Image: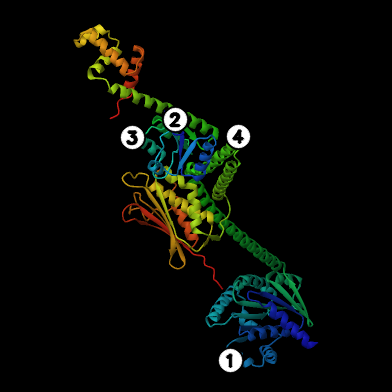
Amino acid sequence: MKDDPPTVFVIDDDPLIRSGVRSLIGSVGLRVLTFGSALDFLRSKRPDAPACLVLDVRLPDLSGLDLQRELHESGIHIPIIFITGYGDIPMTVEAMKAGAVEFLTKPFRGQNLLEAVQGAIARDRAARQERAEIAELRKCFDTLSPREREVLGMVVTGLLNKQIAAELGISELTVKTHRAHIMEKMRAGSLAELVHISDRLRSVPPRE
Amino acid sequence: MATEARMASVDVVGDVAAWGAHFCLFYETKQDLLDTLISYCKSGLERDEYCLWIVAEPLTIDEARAALKNAVPDLDRHFAGSRLEIVAARDWFLPGGAFDGKTLTASWYEKLASLSARGYPGMRITGDTTWLSKKEWTHFCDYEDGLNEVIGNQRLAVLCTYPLAACGAPQILDVVRTHQFVLARRHGNWDVLETATLKRAKAELKGHNEELERRVVERTSELMKASEALREAQVELARVTRLTAMGELSASIAHELKQPLAGAITNSDACLAWLSNQPPNLDEARAAADRTIEAATRASDIIGRIQALFKKTAPERMRVNVNEVIEETLSLIRSETLRNNVSLQTELGSQLPPVLGDRVQLQQVVLNLVKNGIEAMSGVQDRALQLRIRSARYEPNQIVVAVADSGAGIDPQVIGRIFEPFYTTKLQGTGMGLAISRSIIEAHGGRLWVEPNPSHGATFQYTLPAHIESVQ
């Protein structure tokens, strides 16, 4: 999987902070895109790359928390590092509950921000990887016939071929054939692997 | 020499016969008596005063009249105008054959009243005492003593004459005791003796005057101190109100300060990071250092503004740009609007003339009105929270500043009271903000008032006289 270079989006209405953060993050070789408002960010075309968002809580028009909600509702997954001038606890809690990865209070040290950014990008990279793999598995799963899906569901709950055959009213040999197809289509080398794949698929409901 | 002596005598008696004077003359010879009384009467007649001369043996009425005629050529005119009377002592003092001090005293009151009714500026009396016998002496002394009271504050001067030859030492002591001061004329020579009482009275009067003066000075300085204290108290009240408002906005103010500090730290960190890169990127490092300075300068400006608002200095009158006042104030509390989801719009008029005033106090007014506007919108749910600040030229020589909110508006029932001190509709309000704002604007020669908006909320506006220097 070949991605665009990791990108950090910075949204702050204060130009001095914006350029400071851009310079700081740029110094470690990450790509930085800055925005003066949340709306500018939403309107922008974002590259398909591991990314994170450095977001000021208080912004005119659309606040940082509003943007977080908006992104969540549109299914845009991007780790958010909040920066704020107020160490206001209820707000911090709200942001963290909604999935913020870090909450830095102004003034913050550059190292803390860089660590948070690196962490967030690593996390996003992993999440993207995970999402890609699951999408791949989903693709495999979609190739299974209805009967094969039925057999898969029974195999992973630990039923024996004999029990499955009895349950479905088919021969044990037919069950074996289904299992072989399932293993092949799902690219599973062992029963344990198949169980694991099935768990991963179950953890992410199919996208509508 | 004789002329000089005459002049001197006129001066002496003219001088001493002030209103309220009750004094006596001891004389040696008839001529000494005449010299004195003629100058006494003459100076009274010249001042259009009423003169009564009570003569006693050996002087006769005719002699007195003749002597006076020599000094006052138009004497007949004075007689005709009833301005001068010369009467015999026995007729005056002993009307029933005996001396009656009480009746006599009463007659003085009557005479004074009738003279004052006839418009005389005052009455000048002289009476001789050669008729006095030892038998009447004590009574007469009592009468003389009582006369001091009659004379009191009246426009009346009384000169009592005593022949020195007829007075023994006890009599002289009595006379001196009952009069304010004593003249003595012996063979053309004058002596003036003040009595102890008069000296004491004068000293007392001087003391009273000094005391009065001291009290006036004291009261004046107390009053000045009080008015200075009042002025200081007003300034202090404005400052305390300002500090209270600042305290309520402290979270926003802290945020405004943290913002550039965060900018400085982030840019310094960026600068260090570029320097530690291999190879160091000096251009990036320099740019970051420049921004650090910019951010630190901004922080320092903010501190300066906060400090100014906290400072305890007397109000000044300087040329002030109204728009700068608004911008500076907003720079401290802009995040208060963000915090409350209030959208802030400014429409500041261009090329406004300056006003003459105290920058800090004018910032305080903006601070109060903006804070008020934000608070007025705190309960609003169904519409956008908007605060509009506008400045413009108003009439040729005025500037108007308007702060409009989209809040709940003001109850017409209380609109007349909101500028009263301690009147507040807020749970946490001190009720001083608007009162102080109005007094500040009025002290600057302007007006502060409020009007309801057509749709929602209210607009507070104030005018300030423009400071336009004549271009000549």
- Pointers 1 and 3 within a single chain: no
Dot 2: element:
loop
Three-letter amino acid code of the residue under disc 1: Ala
Please tell me how crowded label 1 is: few (under 14), some (14-19), or many (20+) other residues with Cα within 10 Å: few
Three-letter amino acid code of the residue under disc 2: Val
Please tell me how crowded label 4 is: few (under 14), some (14-19), or many (20+) other residues with Cα within 10 Å: few
Three-letter amino acid code of the residue under disc 3: Glu
Q: State the residue in front, A16 or B149.
A: A16
Three-letter amino acid code of the residue under disc 4: Gln
Please identify, in this view, whether the residue under mark 1 or under mark 3 is nearer the observer. 3
Please identify, in this view, whether the residue under mark 4 or under mark 2 is nearer the observer. 4
Query: In this figure, which residue is indicated by the disc labeled 2?
Result: A101
Which residue shows up at 25% across the image and 16% down it? A148
Dot 4: element:
loop
Give whichever of discs 3 and 2 has the lower sequence position: 3
The chain letter for the residue carrying disc 4 is B
Give whichever of discs 1 and 4 has the lower sequence position: 1
Q: CA distance from mark 4 to mark 2?
A: 30 Å
On residue B278, the disc is 4
Q: Give the x, y percent position of residue B377.
A: 37, 47
- Pointers 1 and 2 within a single chain: no
Which residue shows up at 32% across the image and 52% down it? B456
Please tell me how crowded label 2 is: few (under 14), some (14-19), or many (20+) other residues with Cα within 10 Å: many
Q: CA distance from mark 3 to mark 4?
A: 43 Å
Q: Which quadrant is the C terminus of chain A positioned in?
A: top left
Q: Give the x, y percent position of residue A42.
A: 38, 41
Dot 1: element:
helix
For residue B186, above or below residue B434: below
Please tell me how crowded label 3 is: few (under 14), some (14-19), or many (20+) other residues with Cα within 10 Å: few
Answer with left or right where residue B406 lies relative to residue B35: left
On residue A73, the disc is 3
Query: In this figure, which residue is indicated by the disc labeled 1?
Result: B80
